[in-house]
Image: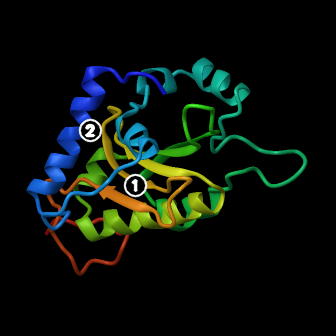
Amino acid sequence: MGIRPQWKTSFFYGVVSLMLGTGLLGGRAIAVDDETVLLLTDPLEIQSLNLPEERQQLINQGVVTPETISQTGLTVPSLWWAQQQYGGNLLEYWFAFPGREDVPPRVDLLVNQQVWNNTDYLAQYGFLLRFGRVSEEFGYSTRVFNGRGELLGAYICPSNAPTCRIFLSPATPNAFLNPLAPLITPATSP
């Protein structure tokens, strides 16, 4: 896999430190495989995804988007139903990147930052869990990003692991605003 750039390694250790510091790991260290490290540190090149010609180039390389339609059968991964059921006004766009030798297959979700920030932690978890499970059925891991390309969460299913892991940043302004609100429905201001 090669040597990872210094900032990626630092970012990874920062994420793990944040999780340990906030008690998400219950004070225990966890072993993380290379695939998980890659998915937690590999950035989303958001600048190139906003240009129509760049999106078309990605589609030509096998990346699936909401505009991708197979003429012969089911487009894999099929996320349209999940988008209609769970996306609401939170999900803005998604990309499904096929796996390569050095990078596992993944679905990258772009969410509306304002809606995400106004959504409580349990709803964010539910959103990630639902999309993660749908993506997992097709052999993909899932990552959630805001419009600036910042990683907000991940549902990672390493190929050699029996279970998937969820990584979700608790650092949103309204993380516990309304824990009784139904999942996926953003909490509203009074």
Q: Is residue 37 visible?
A: yes
For residue 12, the mark is 2
Residue 95 in the figure: left or right of residue 118: right
Residue 68 in the figure: left or right of residue 21: right
> Residue 172: where, in percent of width, then height?
18, 53
Residue 148 in the figure: left or right of residue 49: left
Residue 47 occupies quadrant: top left
Residue at the farthest left position? 21
Which residue is at 30% across, 54% downward?
Answer: 115
Q: Is residue 171 visible?
A: no
Which residue is at 54% across, 46% downward?
Answer: 107
For residue 90, the mark is 1
> Residue 92: where, in percent of width, then height?
46, 46
Instruction: Tell me the element at label 2.
Output: helix
- Give the CA separation, mark 2 to mark 1: 26 Å
Which residue is at 29% across, 54% downward?
Answer: 116
* Dot 2 and dot 1 residues touching (CB under 8 Å): no
Mark 2 or mark 1, earlier in chain? 2
Q: How is the image coloured?
A: rainbow
Amino acid carrying label 1: it is Leu
For residue 155, the mark is none
> Residue 17: where, in percent of width, then height?
15, 47
> Residue 65: where, in percent of width, then height?
63, 41
Amino acid carrying label 2: it is Phe
Tag 1: Cα neighbours inside 10 Å, few (<14), some, or many (≥20)? Answer: many
Q: Nearer the viewer, mark 2 or mark 1?
A: 2
Residue at the farthest bottom position? 180
